[in-house]
Image: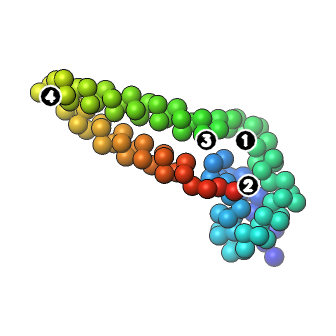
Amino acid sequence: MIEDYAMFDYYASLPPRARSYGRVAARFGLSRTAVARRGKRGQWPARARARDAATGDLEDGADRDARHLIALRLVQETAMRAITEQPDSPLAAAGLGALPVAVEAERAIRQGSEETLDE
C-alpha cells in the first residue's frame, strides 16, 4: 500500500496552482476519490500552504500570472509601436523577434490558468 506521506509529499511539491488530487491519483495509479479521501483526512491543502509559507514560496500563482501577463502585454505594445512607427530601425527588428515570444508566453499562461484544479 502506498503511504500517505509519499502522496502528500508529491502533492505539496507541485506548484500551488497545479496541485490537485487528480494529479496525485494519476501519479500513484489510484482513483481520484481514494486520493481525495486521504487528502481531506490528512488536511493536505492546509499543510501544503504551511509548507509553502515555511519555505518562502508565498506568492500565489494567480498573482504571479497576473504580474507576468502585464509585463508581456507591455512587451507586445512596445514591439508593435516600434514596428509600426520605426519599421526600418533596429528596435523594429528587435520587436519582430520579441513579439511572437511574448504572444506565445501569454498564450501559455492563459491556457494554464484555465485548467480546473481541485483541492
Q: Secondary structure at mark 3?
A: helix
* Mark 1 to mark 3 CA distance (whole Å): 12 Å
According to the picture, the residue beneath numbered tag 3 turns out to be 61
Residue closer to the observer: 4 or 31: 31
Q: Secondary structure at mark 2?
A: loop
| Residue 46 rendering spot, x and y as whole percentages | 81, 47
On the rendered structure, is 93 left or right of 45? left
Residue type at the position of mark 2: Glu
On the rendered structure, is 38 left or right of 80? right
| Residue 31 rendering spot, x and y as whole percentages | 72, 73
* Mark 2 to mark 3 CA distance (whole Å): 14 Å
Residue type at the position of mark 1: Asp
Do we see residue 6 in this rendering?
no
According to the picture, the residue beneath numbered tag 4 turns out to be 87
Task: Report the mark closest to the observer, 1 or 3.
Answer: 3
Which mark, residue 119? 2
Residue type at the position of mark 3: Gly
| Residue 66 rendering spot, x and y as whole percentages | 53, 35
